[in-house]
Image (cartoon, rainbow, N blue to C red):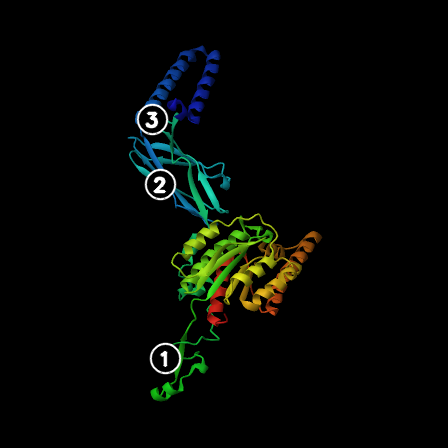
Amino acid sequence: MKFIKSLYLNNFFFYVLLGIIGLFVCAFIFPVLYNGVWFLVLVLITFLVLDVLLLYIARTGIEASREMHEKLSNGDLNPVSISIINHYTFPVSVKIIDEIPFQFQVRDFKIERTVKASGQDKVTYDLRPTERGEYYFGNLNIYVSSPLKLISRRFTFDKDKMVPTYPSYIQLRKYDLLAFSNNLFQYGIKKIRRIGHTMEFEQIKEYVQGDDLRTLNWKATAKKNALMVNQFQDEKSQSVYLAIDKGRVMQMPFNGLSLLDYAINSTLVLANVILKKQDKAGIFAFSKKVENRVFAEKRGSQMQKILETLYNIKTDFFESDYSRLYVDVKKNINQRSLIILYTNFETMDGLNRQLPYLKGIAKSHLLVVVFFSNTELNEIINKKTDTIQEVYDKVIAEKFMFEKRLIANELKKYGIHSVLTQPENLTLDAINKYLEIKSRGIL
């Protein structure tokens, strides 16, 4: 029974069979061909039996395995490798059909290769998940054909493997040392000139151009007969909370990924930068209520706790309740903290409904609102217009883009910092804003 299930006739066999049938038709017109056609049938059967013997004489003709990370990174290209070992003493043609999780909707996956006699080969392809959760791989099917190519033998490996998809840990590794690099401008990170300082004394050093003149140490200057300044350390262990709006406004997709998942990926990277900067990182998410909370701490296990919490964020995209957010922040965050809020506002009316609660949070904490510009509107604005309808669409798009800038200005009026960014630039812009606040010492 296993033999029958694993044996498949190739297209080449049917092409040959179709040719023989054509010759039989010709034999009715030219009887002299009749015996020759039957000889071809005998040859086909002989080669078919020989092909079966070649492929089935070895019990383990092919070994294959699927190699990948223990978890997938959401929104990134994840490499998947398939290693093949040929135990046959002749070269074989292999057709690889991997049963990819249904979330990818890949229905025509097929890779064909030729593996040398007693040789090895490795095939790599990429998968880009666009939602968090569990992804189930099915069988890894390898169809093997001998040089005769009449039949194929199917080998099955790696049955029913589950791989979880976590927030983008690939971005986490990419930006791990970004906050401490001397070449930050290469990544779009701006160097911010510090306009203030803390009172935590570090050392006395010689004055160089650009040092704050207010820090001149006159006594040391008199002794050294050169300008000397006091140098202060940055304040550390400040609390930074990353708040994620998981309501209806974060359901909008860009490049296959929802705004919520962009925010989750950015939160993971930014939390790592915060901890590397010796601050305390915490997160929470909200829609109808505040949940998925990790209190701001600076423990060795904090990143793992944040990663697991972000992975488990689930939402039905309800309307977000900012009054609950305000009450929860007032109740649970007693120390003045930096709160970076990932949300989205499309219109001034949408902002004005929530503005009283944002102003209330900003009275006790330093609030940064991160919201998104619509990249599709940019395409409409930059597109050449030929018809009245296109002109109308362009005017409406410009209105919406202008309203986004009005939202940023309105937040600024009440001392609320804002970051208007495109989804693909979210992580860099969020890191920029955090480093700017640290450099200016305004927390």
**Residue matched to label 3:** 55
What residue do we see at 46% from left, 70% from top?
439
Q: Secondary structure at mark 2?
A: strand
**Mark 2 sits on what residue?**
122
Residue 7 appears in view: no
User: 63 or 149: nearer the eye?
Assistant: 63
Q: Position of residue 312 (x, y in %)?
A: 48, 49
Residue 345 spot, x, y in % from top left? 61, 58
Which numbered circle lies on residue 443? none
| Residue 351, horizontal then vertical, whole percent | 63, 60
Label 1 SS = strand
Q: Amino acid at mark 2?
A: Lys
**Which residue is pictured at 45% across the width and 57% down the height?**
269
Q: Amino acid at mark 3?
A: Leu
Asked if residue 123 is positioned above or below residue 244 in the image, the reply reads above
Alpha carbon of mark 1 to alpha carbon of mark 2: how far?
58 Å
295 vs 216: above or below? above
Disc with the residue nearer the chain's start (1 vs 2) = 2
Q: Point out the frontmost of discs 1 and 2.
A: 1
Question: What is the tally of numbered marks visible in this picture?
Answer: 3
Q: Residues within 10 Å of mark 3 (few under 14, many from 20)?
A: many
**Helix, strand or loop status at disc 3:** helix
